[in-house]
Amino acid sequence: MGCDRNCGLIAGAVTGALMAVFGGILMPVGDILIEKTVKKEAVLEEGTIAFKSWVKTGTEVYRQVWIFDVQNPEEVAVNSSKIKVKQRGPYTYRVRYLAKENITHDSETHTVSFLQPNGAIFEPSLSVGTENDTFTVLNLAVAYNTADGVYKVFNGKDDISKVAIIDTYKGKKHLSYWPSYCDMINGTDGASFPPFIEKTRVLQFFSSDICRSFYAVFGAEINLKGIPVYRFILPSLAFASPLQNPDNHCFCTEKIISKNCTLYGVLDIGKCKDGKPVYISLPHFLHASPEIAEPVEGLSPNEEEHSTYLDVEPITGFTLQFAKRLQINVLVKPGKSIGALKGLKQNYMVPVLWLNETGTIGDEKAELFRNQVTGKIELLGLVEMILISVGAVMFTAFMISYCACRLKSVE
């Protein structure tokens, strides 16, 4: 009887160990600690890792500019021939090196507002020429040295799933450029996203220079300087026609040039550029309708060189590497009152320049990130594995004892 009683006690212990290992007592401990640590450091407030990197990025960001030099302007003007362009560049500028200004915290709404200065420093060593080089291009002013904002973003203090998401831009929740939901300001500025990112998540981000919100989808897993990251890419559907992607119907604001919204790959942003006939696309008209690029010679679209992507550390949501690539085009139409346009017999979507803005976490920052963030997460993961292992050992020991006891009882 005593042995049976002991076997019963052991069986109870075995059941307890089984619940501990497989019933959720030991396994979530590491996850809980990881989540608690990340939530603490991802909040945008004084003293956190996120806030320090958010105020002033430690990553060197460069904007490369390639100019499309028109080789046959007279021939085009007289005969309405194909435009022959030659890509010249890159001309490289260092950007985003200035800290955010006018940072104001609002504890009641759990938001923080700021201005983002947009200075640009020319980098001769990373360029093929000087700023005094001459080209034959359409006259299009591109301004760099202006402040962007005011932005107001959520700090994540009350809800970490909203951290860095834009609440208002210039005091508004909408842009006043597009009809319907296309006018909404969605997501973050792309520098970071709410933590604990799954591959199935669609990352939304707002780009003020092109006057709309975009989105990115998971593309691949990448190892960036010893840090596992998810690469999210800007899909071709973002520039698709409403026929290909019905969600884009409100981005088609004119019917003639777009051929009743059937053409794809370019976006009219004239409303936010003082009415100028400015269109944006991916470089070299990547993923654009063939007939848009047909009147232009000298283009070579390439997915690897001309696509946009974000490399995001999935647990913290920090963007550790990115490439933002866009092309600026000008619509040129025949015009009887303008001498240079009298001979044109068709519309031209003329590429003026394309931009490649890139940033990669530096070696020192990467090591710091591994030590302060990845290292802690790996340590907590190790603790979780130890707890699971201890539970498994206890389970095995109890099973051996139980079986031995039962065998003794049978004898």
Image (cartoon, rainbow, N blue to C red):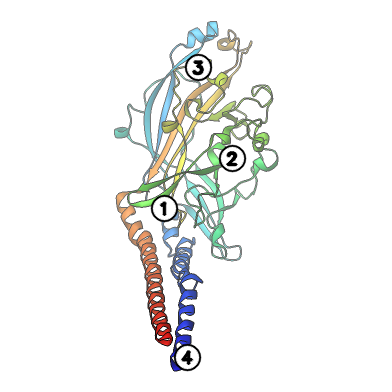
- Name the N-terminal-most of marks 1 and 2: 1
- Name the N-terminal-most of marks 3 and 1: 1
Q: Residues within 10 Å of mark 4 (few under 14, many from 20)?
A: few
292 up-or-down from 49: above or below: above
Residue shown at the point (41%, 77%) measured from the top left: 399
**How far apart are labels 2 and 4 at the CA level?**
72 Å
Q: Secondary structure at mark 1?
A: loop
User: Which mark identifies residue 276?
Assistant: none
Q: Residues within 10 Å of mark 2 (few under 14, many from 20)?
A: many
Q: Nearer the viewer, residue 222 or 168?
A: 222
**How far apart are labels 3 and 4 at the CA level?**
90 Å
Amino acid tagged 2: Arg
Q: Residues within 10 Å of mark 3 (few under 14, many from 20)?
A: some
User: Which mark identifies residue 5?
Assistant: 4
**How far apart are labels 1 and 2 at the CA level?**
24 Å
**How far apart are labels 1 and 4 at the CA level?**
67 Å
**How far apart are labels 3 and 1 at the CA level?**
41 Å
**How far apart are labels 2 and 3 at the CA level?**
27 Å
Amino acid tagged 1: Lys
* Quarter placement of the C terminus: bottom left
- Name the N-terminal-most of marks 1 and 4: 4
Where does residue 27 sit, x and y in percent of width and height? Answer: 46, 69
Query: From this viewpoint, which residue is outermost toward the top?
Result: 79
Residue behind mark 1 = 56
In this rendering, the label closer to the viewer, 1 or 4: 4
Amino acid tagged 3: Val
Residue behind mark 2 = 212
User: Which mark identifies residue 296?
Assistant: 3
Q: In the visual, does 49 lie left or right of 169?
A: left
